[in-house]
Amino acid sequence: MLRDAFRMKLKPGCIEEYRKRHDRIWPELVKAHSDCGICDYSIYLDEETLTLFAFRRLTEKNTADRMGELDIIKKWWEYNRDLMEVNPDNSPVFTPLVEVFHMD
């Protein structure tokens, strides 16, 4: 199992709406993540900086790097573009993070 982490950024005033939309996550979006080999996915928020920290566990044969090609992912990005810093294609601006410590 691989571990992957990255950060994203919310826009000011969007915390509650971001939570609400994730509380009502679309089942087909969850399935797409699972189909791409993502078995565990958590997002944490630093409320002071509006930084989102995402952590996910990936299968060895995952296709997570190609998720942006899926229509359901593009639809989710479009739906959330008003809440986050995004790229021109509406994908979240994200910065990969380097693991410096892990303990089982």
Image (cartoon, rainbow, N blue to C red):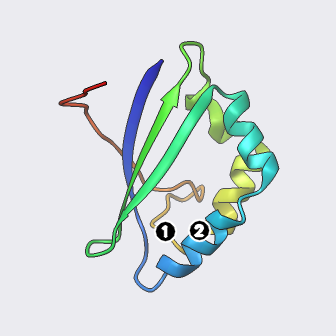
Question: To which quarter of the image does residue 12 belong?
Answer: bottom left
Residue 5: % across, % down: 38, 39
Q: Is residue 11 above or below residue 78?
A: below
Q: In this view, does 99 lie to the left or right of 70?
A: left
Q: Residue 81 carries which label?
A: 2
Quarter where residue 20 is shown: bottom right
The residue that disc 1 covers is 84
Do labels 1 and 2 touch, CB within 8 Å?
yes
Q: Position of residue 49 (x, y in %)?
A: 27, 72
- Point 55% across, 36% down: residue: 40
SS for tag 1? loop
Image point (31%, 24%), residue name: 104
Residue 75 circle label: none
| Of the pair 59 and 67, the residue shown nearer to us | 59
From this viewpoint, is residue 82 visible? no
Residue at x-position 70% and y-position 52%: 74
Q: Residue furthest left?
A: 100
Q: At which x and y percent is residue 30?
A: 72, 45
Residue at the (25%, 31%) spot, across then down: 99
